[in-house]
Image: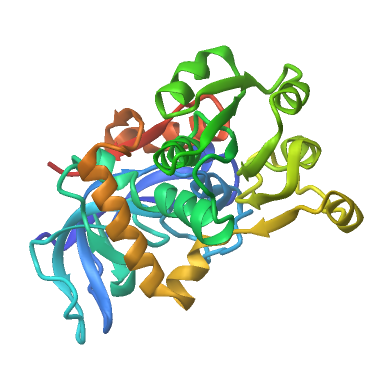
Amino acid sequence: MADTMRAWRIETNGEPAEVMAVAEVPVPAPGPGEVLVRNRAVAVNFPDVLLARGMYQERPPLPFTPGIELCGEVAAVGSGVTSVAVGQRVVATSIGVMAEYAVVPAWSVHDAPESLDDAAAAAFLIAYQTAWFGLHQRAALQSGETLLVHAAAGGVGTAACQLGAAAGATVVGIVGSEAKTRVAKDAGASRVLLRGDDWIGAVKAAGGADVVFDPVGGKAFAGATKVVNFEGRIVVVGFASGEVPPVRADHALVKNYSVLGLHWALYQRKRPELVAEAHAALTRLAAEGAVRPVVAETVPFDGAADAVQRLADGTTTGRLVVAVGE
């Protein structure tokens, strides 16, 4: 193993294409409870955009390496780690993985699903765990219910569509352009509506939504409160629109619906056994072909900054994955 590696670094906050640069840095060593992974692929996630801008809920000190989700093989383990072995193919999540090697906490490491190649496995953990916990742990989605998914052609949106369909729900997707319609339909949405059209009226006319999965916020959340049914559940996943909407307690009372927050990373810290159970269930679904990350493009390592910028600009569908090693 070499002493140095290539890593993407951010030395000042701003737009990803302007502030991300490749540097040669020492290969880190795993400490107690940590795992060193030789990366094969790193998925691009919206938190990478927020990290570059200095707007993420966790703000590592400058300079730092972005990237939060990987697939690779274990290169070394720190003291006390018995859950994984050197050479094992794994997926993991931790800030700072957009590099040839990454040190991650042992509790964030899971077996990579055998049914998924490196690119798909790199894009599997966060999106599907987020969708799983949002739909099942928080909203208790039931077969026969109607699930409305905002940003249904995005990474977490396609995961929510696939899992909703697998659970027997009727899935309605909201997308930002006609070009994204096919992606959402292929992911399991039986009906896809454009955000710019009267999707609120269309959903109401079709009987409303029992569960709303919202990673967008802003006007998407405001619309969700208008279409959510009696005893419906709105799952707040994120604010890709950049607008954090107000939650009207009086409106929730009058319509008798729930607004449920989802911060999946907290489950890793507070209920890791539930994360392990979800990963096992999701791995089975992947083996059965019921779920599979929609990897729109795999880009070379040197193209990572451009890929993160494209996600920031909202021009992507599915997932972008950075190829790191062979």
Query: In the displayed structure, does residue 15 sit left or right of residue 21?
Result: right
What is the total number of numbered labels drawn onto the structure image? 0
198 or 27: nearer the viewer: 198
Q: Residue at x 60, y 48 (%)?
A: 53
Q: Quadrant of the C terminus?
A: top left
Looking at the picture, does residue 178 appear above or below residue 323?
above
Is residue 4 toward the left or the right of residue 55 in the image?
left
Q: Residue, x 45% and y 53% (percent of image)?
A: 132
Counting from the top left corner in percent of width and height, residue 80 is at 21, 86
Q: Where is residue 61 shown, x and y percent of the image?
A: 53, 66
Residue 173: which quarter of the image?
A: top right
Residue 169, position as x, y percentages in the image: 50, 38
Res. 92 in view: no
User: Residue 80: in sight, yes or no?
Assistant: yes
Kindly identify the residue that appears in the image at 31 percent across and 37 percent down.
292
With 205 as the anchor, is 97 left or right in this view? left
* Residue 222 versus residue 47 in the image, above or below: above
Position of the N terminus by quadrant: bottom left
Quarter of image, res 5: bottom left
Check the image and report above or below for 299 versus 49.
Answer: above
Residue 76 appears at what percent x and percent y? 14, 70
- Which residue appears farthest toward the front when viewing the image? 144
Colour treatment of the image: rainbow
